[in-house]
Amino acid sequence: MKSEIVEAFSQLVREKSMEKDVLSRIIEDIFLSMIKKKYGASDNFDVFVNMEKGEIEIYQSKTVVEQVENDLTEIDLATARQAEESYEIGDEYMEIINPSQFGRRLIISAKQNLNQRIKEVEKEHIFEEFKNRVGEIISGDIRQLNKDEIFLSAEGTEVVLPKSEQIPNERYRRGENLRAVIKEVKWSTRGPEIVVSRSDPMFLTRLFELEVPEIYDGIIEIKCIAREPGERTKIAVYSNDKRIDAVGACVGMKGMRIQAIVKELNNEKIDIINWSSEPEIFITRALSPAKPKRIAIDEEARKVIALLDDDQISLAIGKGGQNRRLAVRLTGYDIQTVKEEEYKAIMADETEENLLLANVDSLSEKILSTLQLGGYDTIQDVLDAGISKLTELPGIGEKTAARILAVVEDAVSEDDEQD
């Protein structure tokens, strides 16, 4: 039984590329809803949709009775026998309902309901599809430019590029084609919201995978990335095959691979270094183009002092501290860049301050024990305390305190003479 609404259904199948069984269930639900509006109930109705033939069949089940009390569920014997002589009291009578009986208003309402349901299914389909594509690069045309976000049309779907995910020094134009990485897919009041990014390190990772087959194949690994979008990036790579140079593979013949990535990122500078499991080597490489003379590492505090020649300090720090800042983020260590003279001064101060009282031979074990119990473990602790504080300790008077200070000061003097 062909109708105009069925033709509309067929058109929707073609336009939305929906599965026919999904659309069939939606149509069945809509017609049952129409039936409920017209008759007040739909319990004794069945709807069958044949999408291949473009047919909808509606059946109303009634019980054959002598006297009808409910037109919706009952039919008298005489009327039933007009259709089939064999009907008896108590039999189930099946009546075919023509969809045209619902009237134009109900059919228009059904079309509107269908469009709404189609949009909901389409939104769910988009959400499920893109949810599994997080981390994938997508290309789209800029459709709308706002102050805080840019809307792109990608693969027939609207995606959003927030200001926080844009490269700061880039300028965008309506209609321009743009590539970005799918960062997040979330459900909002408007439906699925697909957030893309050009500033996230993941975008850089995917670009390298596209340009460097060895990374895509897993021969070369990207260990870590420190990025200031639009300005500069440091990336550490490692080759699982000793025959392949990780940095060379990423740069490519005559720099073609890295140039393609730099062009995509609006000339963002990219430093590629070889990753190392040895912190001293890795930190030294991370500070390039500067070349530290020596690296002092405090593993427990995750702190580093990088000793450099005078002409290397500015390179290590970089413009606005950028080089050192990126090296810190890349390695995970707090890096302090110092000149050789400054380093010697720092070490001398620390040696004096941290010289243990236990190394002072002139102090008896009893006095040492008393001082340590009082919280005075180093020479600097005693010097800072002075006579007034030392006399507060049990068994130490002014004379003893003065003698302790004299002994400690002599120890400091001897240490300075040796230096």
Image (spheres, helix red, strand yellow):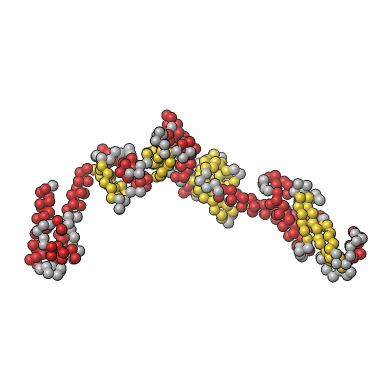
Q: Is residue 81 visible?
A: yes
Q: Is residue 22 left or right of residue 195?
A: right
Q: Nearer the viewer, residue 337 or 399?
A: 399
Q: Is residue 385 left or right of residue 279?
A: left
**Quadrant of the rendered structure where residue 319 is?**
top left
Q: Is residue 177 left or right of residue 306?
A: right
Q: Is residue 336 above or below residue 401?
A: above
User: At which x and y percent is residue 338?
Assistant: 25, 45
What number of labels is visible?
0
User: At which x and y percent is residue 345?
Assistant: 19, 47
Residue at coordinates 28% horizontally, 50% vertically from top-left? 298
Residue at coordinates 46% horizontally, 42% vertically from top-left? 205
Residue at coordinates 35% horizontally, 42% vertically from top-left? 276
User: At which x and y percent is residue 317?
Assistant: 31, 43
Q: Is residue 243 above or below residue 159?
A: above
Q: Is residue 361 above or below residue 76?
A: above
Q: Is residue 320 visible?
A: no
Q: Nearer the viewer, residue 325 or 354?
A: 354
Q: Is residue 374 above or below residue 306?
A: below
**Quadrant of the rendered structure where residue 357 is?**
bottom left
User: At which x and y percent is residue 14?
Assistant: 70, 44
Residue at coordinates 52% horizontally, 47% vertically from top-left? 134
